[in-house]
C-alpha cells in the first residue's frame, strides 16, 4: 500500500517529498530493509531538528510525522504496522522539546498493537521490544505507562484471557518490562509469580516459551 500524502502541517519541512519516500520504504517484508528505512527516517528527523531548531514549523512537522506513524500502526496490514513500530523504535531516541508528550504518544501507539485484532505474532513481538526500549529511555514519564502496561498484562494473564494474541502479548510485555524497568517491575513481583503459571501451562508452546523467558528475566 502506497504512503498517503503528507498532511499540510509538514509540507514546509518536506518540500522535496523525502519524508514520503522514507515512510513508503518502511513497508517491506525484508527486515533489514525496514530497519535501514527507519534509521534513515530518524536521521532525517534529526537533520530537520537541527535546521529548524525549536521553531513552530518543526513542531508541525513532528505532528504530521506522528500522525503518519499512527496511520501505519493502526493499519489492518501487518507490514504497515511493523513499519510504524520500527519508526517508533528509532524515534524514541530523538530528543525533542515536548519529549514527555512524545513518550506518552508512542506508548499509546504501541498499546494499540497489543489490543489489535489484526496484529500477528511477529508484530506483537516487535511492539513489545519497542515498549521495552521506551521504558529504558522514557525519563520521568516511564513510571506512568509502565505501571499501566504491567497491570494490564497481569490482568490478561490472571483472567486467562480467551484470546491467544492477548496472552501472548501479556508474557512478551512482562518479559521486556522485567528487563527494562526492574525497579518498577519488582513492585508487582508477587502478582507476577502467581500469574505466570497461566503462561507456563498454556496450551500453546510459544506462550509457554515466552513465559519461561519472562520468569527468567524476573529472577535475574
Image (cartoon, grey):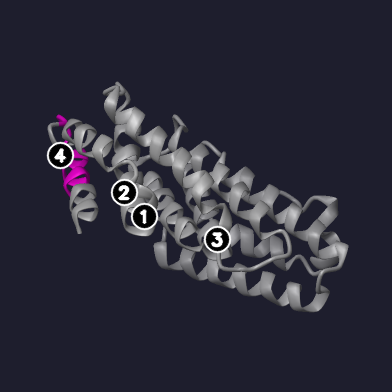
Q: Is residue 133 left or right of residue 87?
A: left
Give residue 140's quadrant in the image.
Answer: bottom right
Percent position of residue 78, x then y: 46, 43
Nearer to us of marks 2 and 3 is 2
Residue for point 32% across, 58% down: 179
Numbered label attached to residue 186: 2
Measure the alpha-carbon separation of dots 2 and 3. 18 Å
Q: Which residue is mark 3?
A: 139
**Mark 2 or mark 3, earlier in chain:** 3
Nearer to us of marks 1 and 3 is 1
Q: Secondary structure at mark 1?
A: helix
Residue for point 34% across, 44% down: 187
Percent position of residue 63, x then y: 75, 53
Q: Which residues are magenta?
A: 202-212
Q: Secondary structure at mark 4?
A: helix
Measure the alpha-carbon separation of dots 1 and 3. 14 Å
Give residue 52's quadrant in the image.
Answer: bottom right
Q: Is residue 140 above or below residue 199?
A: below
Q: Which residue is mark 4?
A: 205
Q: Residues within 10 Å of mark 2 (few under 14, many from 20)?
A: some
Nearer to us of marks 4 and 1 is 1
Look at the image and tell me whether residue 1 can be seen. Answer: no
Measure the alpha-carbon separation of dots 2 and 4. 26 Å
Numbered label attached to residue 183: 1
Q: Nearer the viewer, residue 134 or 146?
A: 146
| Cβ atoms under marks 2 and 3 closer than 8 Å | no
Numbered label attached to residue 109: none
Amino acid at each position: 500500500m502506497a504512503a498517503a500524502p503528507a498532511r499540510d502541517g509538514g509540507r514546509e519541512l518536506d518540500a522535496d517529498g523525502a519524508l514520503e519516500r522514507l515512510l513508503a520504504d518502511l513497508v517491506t517484508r525484508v527486515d533489514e530493509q525496514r530497519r535501514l528505512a527507519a534509521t534513515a527516517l530518524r536521521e532525517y528527523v534529526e537533520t530537520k531538528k537541527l535546521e529548524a531548531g525549536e521553531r513552530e514549523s518543526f513542531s508541525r512537522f513532528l505532528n504530521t510525522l506522528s500522525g503518519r506513524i499512527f496511520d501505519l500502526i493502526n493499519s489492518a496490514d501487518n507490514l504497515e504496522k511493523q513499519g510504524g513500530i520500527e519508526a517508533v523504535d528509532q524515534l524514541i531516541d530523538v530528543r525533542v522539546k515536548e519529549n514527555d508528550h512524545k513518550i506518552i504518544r508512542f506508548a499509546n501507539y504501541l498499546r494499540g498493537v497489543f489490543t489489535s485484532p489484526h496484529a500477528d505474532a511477529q508484530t506483537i513481538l516487535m511492539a513489545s521490544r519497542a515498549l521495552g526500549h521506551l521504558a529504558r529511555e522514557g525519563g520521568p514519564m516511564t513510571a506512568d505507562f509502565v505501571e499501566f502496561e504491567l497491570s494490564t498484562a497481569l490482568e490478561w494473564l490472571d483472567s486467562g484471557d480467551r484470546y491467544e494474541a492477548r496472552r501472548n502479548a501479556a508474557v512478551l510485555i512482562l518479559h521486556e518490562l522485567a528487563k527494562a524497568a526492574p525497579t518498577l517491575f519488582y513492585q508487582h513481583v508477587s502478582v507476577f509469580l502467581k500469574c505466570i503459571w497461566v503462561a507456563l501451562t498454556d496450551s500453546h508452546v510459544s506462550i509457554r516459551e515466552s513465559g519461561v523467558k519472562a520468569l527468567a528475566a524476573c529472577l535475574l
